[in-house]
Amino acid sequence: MNKKISFLLGAGVLAAAMTGWGATANVNVSNDTFTDTTSGSPTTTIHEGDVVHWHWSNSNHSTTSGTCSGGGGAYGSPSCTPNGQWDSGIQSSGFDFSHTFSTAGSFAYFCLNHGTMGMTGTIVVQSTVPSCGTITLSPSSVPAGVQGSAYETPLGASGGASPYTFTLASGSLPPGIQLDDSGELHGTPTATGAFSFTVTATDASHCTGTQAYSISVSPDSPAGESIVIPAVGSLAGALGSHFKTQVQLTNPGTSTIAGEIVYHAGNASAGSGDPTIPYTLGSWQTVNFDDVLTAMGLTGLGSADVVPTSGPAPVATVRIFNDDGANGTAGFTEPVFRARDFLSAGDTAVIVLPADPTNFRFNLGVRTLGEGASVTFTIWDESGALLNTVSQQYLPSFFAQTKATGFLGVSSLPPNGSIGITVTHGNAIFFGSTVDNRGSQDTSTQFTRHD
């Protein structure tokens, strides 16, 4: 069985630990030679408070502090003199020995059996510690939680040298929540109450910063009605456009609420495995997703539901925009809907076609609820003449958006005309999106709504 021996040099070890030092340098003991694994030589350079760890690859050697006065002589020659600071004794292959250096200086050592033959080494301990700046953790506060609802909040740090490692310095996290060394607070709270704790961020130079936090976990409450965002997208469009969807959620109430945004990809019914991103909001808190699909690690075009798991749904503000980089953005605020806002059997609606189809392209879209929908479309020209009648059926919890002619299955649509919509079964929202082709990609959209 291999043995491992560790020695601490004086009370200075405690001071070193408090300043964040304690790195380990490794030295291989083999073939009558000490070899530092970093320098590749018998010299090891460390800082105050660091540890040197020797590992025996061959037998009948020691690491013994002291100096050798010169060469020559037989094994065990008194020309090598120990000074008593450390001594592993003669050991066999596989043995490990560690020693902590708390003061600066140069420390010579040798092998009791082979020092007079040149098996010596030197530990150089530097007193200069890299200057530490102010490491700041962010955010300065974290959201509240709800018992039984998923919780996820990332912590970050700045002012030091990356990467950072995060640890719990004091206090207690809510039961069910854990802190990863990457700074991610996540889990599902299992108990209510206020939980205070302090997190330490340690940078690559062993410099540290701390931040005190508190998570208030509220009891679960009945979930409110979901909100539907008819269209969300993060994708390249025609003529160099790149459309994104910003979502802001606000809790105007006095109690903490929680839930998730559920994304449903286009041209398919919603499923139980659809991607989600959670939210937890204390009173009057707002969370922002600059591009909600990017926040989910997704691209594409589809629809989304804001599904409460505790408390009512938040106020949702949604903006669809074309991101033109340094030239800025152009977009519009998209309305959100509850189930009662969907067209139902017997409802009618109108969407007006662009007056200038040469400079404006036009798309149609649909989002249904759990029953799907059956719909009749009538296409009218600007004089009021009926040009075509089209009937369509849509799957449950379904989204689609495409060029209007393809959506309706017709070869062309009249300028300045209109589309009549009559729902004969189920529930649906329809929208028509008009986009300027001439560089700006300016967009306006018409949405149907139950009166």
Image (cartoon, grey):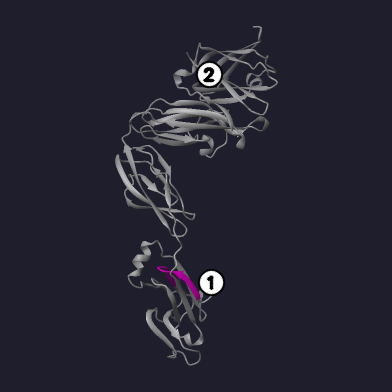
Q: Secondary structure at mark 1?
A: loop
Residue at the spot of label 2: 373
Q: Is 232 left or right of 340, judged from the image as shown?
A: right
Compared to residue 448, the image places residue 127 above or below, namely below
Q: Is residue 29 above or below residue 332?
A: below
SS state under label 2 = strand
Dot 1 surroundings within 10 Å: few (below 14), some, or many (20 or more)?
A: few
Query: Going 40% across and 72% down the picture, which residue do you hit?
Result: 101
Coordinates of residue 395 in the picture (x, y in percent): 54, 23
| Mark closest to the chain's N terminus, 2 or 1 | 1
Tell me which corner region of the image, top left, top right, bottom left or bottom right, holds residue 226: top left
* Residue at the extreme bottom: 73
Q: Are marks 2 and 1 in contact (CB under 8 Å)?
A: no
Q: Is residue 46 magenta?
A: yes
- The residue range painted magenta reads 43-53
Q: Nearer the viewer, mark 2 or mark 1?
A: 1
Q: Position of residue 157 (x, y in %)?
A: 45, 49
Quadrant containing the N terminus in the rendered view: bottom left
Could you say which is closer to the camera, residue 303 or residue 242? Answer: 242
User: Is 238 on the left-hand or right-hand side of 451?
Assistant: right
The amino acid sitting under disc 1 is Ser
Instruction: Give the CA separation, mark 2 to mark 1.
Output: 73 Å
Q: Which residue position is annotated with label 1? A: 39
Q: Residue furthest left?
A: 193
